[in-house]
Every structure is written in C-alpha cells, then in structure tokens.
Image (cartoon, rainbow, N blue to C red):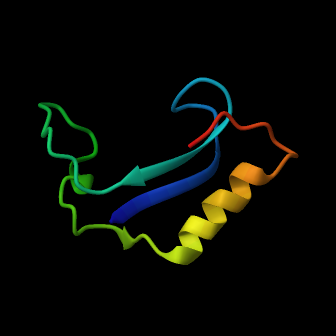
Amino acid sequence: MNYHKYQQVDVVNGEGTRCTLFVAGCEHNCRGCYNKSTLNPNSGHPFTKEMEDQIIADLKDTRIKRRGL
C-alpha cells in the first residue's frame, strides 16, 4: 500500500480531532476529482512499518484526544 500524506493532527477531514492518512489507489475516478494524483496505486510513498508505528504512537498520545484515523 502507498500513501500520499499523513497528518498527525487534523480537524478538517471529519468530526473532532483525528489522524488522517491519504492513501493511493482510488478507483472511483469521480468527475471533478481534486486529488487525481492519488488515483494511481503506485504513486506516493510506500507504507512502512515505521509509518505504522508512528500512527499507532500518535493515536496512543493522550495529550490530544483523537477520535481515530
């Protein structure tokens, strides 16, 4: 799996505060898509064990109450 961007703290893309991971490989190809660069599943960055560990650590961080990923 590849991803394009990871945000440790996001208050825009869903209710409450969360971590957000923008992944590659959308198959919908919606008219007017504003993220066409994410359509190719091989674009972006490889999802690594280090990124997984970072996300888990961020979700466990109690200084900011997050609602999820």
**Furthest residue toward top:** 15
Q: Quadrant of the C terminus?
A: top right
Question: Residue visible at 15% across and 38% down?
Answer: 28
**Furthest residue toward right:** 63
Q: Quadrant of the N terminus?
A: bottom left
Give coordinates of residue 32: x percent, y percent. Answer: 17, 31
Give coordinates of residue 64: x percent, y percent. Answer: 81, 42
Horizontal side of 62 relative to 56 (left or right) equals right
Question: Residue visible at 48% across and 51% down?
Answer: 21
Q: Quadrant of residue 65?
A: top right
Give coordinates of residue 47: x percent, y percent. Answer: 43, 70
How many marks overall?
Answer: 0
Question: Residue visible at 63% across and 39% down?
Answer: 18
Horizontal side of 48 relative to 30 (left or right) equals right
Q: Nearer the viewer, residue 32 or 41?
A: 41
Q: Nearer the viewer, residue 59 or 13?
A: 59
Above/below status of 67 relative to 69: above
Above/below status of 48 relative to 65: below
Question: Residue visible at 26% across and 67% down?
Answer: 43
Horizontal side of 21 relative to 27 (left or right) equals right
Q: Quadrant of residue 25?
A: bottom left
